[in-house]
Amino acid sequence: MPSAELMKQNVHRYLELVGEAKADDIAELYADDATVEDPVGGEVHIGRTAIHNFYSGMLGLKAETEVITLRALGHEAAYLWALIIDGGEGGKTRLEILSVMAFDGDGKITAMKAYWGPENFSQV
């Protein structure tokens, strides 16, 4: 089982890479057979290739991330965070997301679910 500290480090690394829109590096954080459901109720992306393709949709995105709260227990981490998207002259948009990740013994992400919807967007 991964330590709470390792899971927290990997969550922070994941969020850093999301802010930088680095799909290749994000995909490397996942186990080969991992799943991503973002948002919950949407398509489930299975396997590192599908996960890479999902995150590739962020290319060119100018954003920053902020951790609001993070808990890591057992082999899972749950965290509330914000994605602040820079829309240029259109201003910034903030999306608050509740995410849950499961990890294997090596700290690779085996599953990620993101809970958010239209009501979680606001103008900054």
Image (spheres, rainbow, N blue to C red):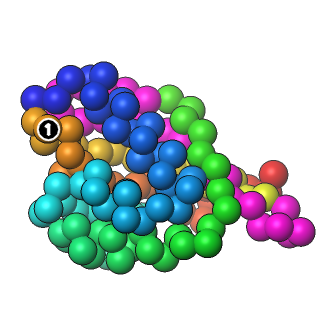
Q: Main secondary structure of the magenta part?
A: strand
* Figure check: 6 above or below 43: above
User: Could you tell whether 68 is left or right of 74 in the image?
Assistant: right
Which amino acid type corresponds to the residue marked 1 in the rendered image?
Asp
Looking at this rendering, what residue extends furthest in the right direction?
Answer: 89
Q: Secondary structure at mark 1?
A: loop
Q: Which residue is mark 1?
A: 106
Magenta-drawn segment: 70-91
User: Where does the image place residue 58, in percent across and percent down from the top left?
Assistant: 53, 70
- Is 85 a magenta residue? yes
* Figure check: 118 above or below 74: below
**Closest to the observer: 48 or 68?**
48
- Can you tell which quarter of the image residue 54 is in? bottom left
- Is 25 a magenta residue? no
User: Where does the image place residue 78, in percent across and percent down from the top left?
Assistant: 36, 37
**Closest to the observer: 90 or 53?**
53
Q: Quadrant of the N terminus?
A: top left
Residue at 14% from the left image edge and 38% from the top image edge: 106
Residue at 50% from the left image edge and 55% from the top image edge: 18
**Closest to the observer: 31 or 94?**
31
Give the tally of numbered discs. Answer: 1
- Can you tell which quarter of the image residue 119 is in? bottom right
| Observer able to see residue 65 | yes
User: Where does the image place residue 111, in percent across and percent down from the top left?
Assistant: 23, 53
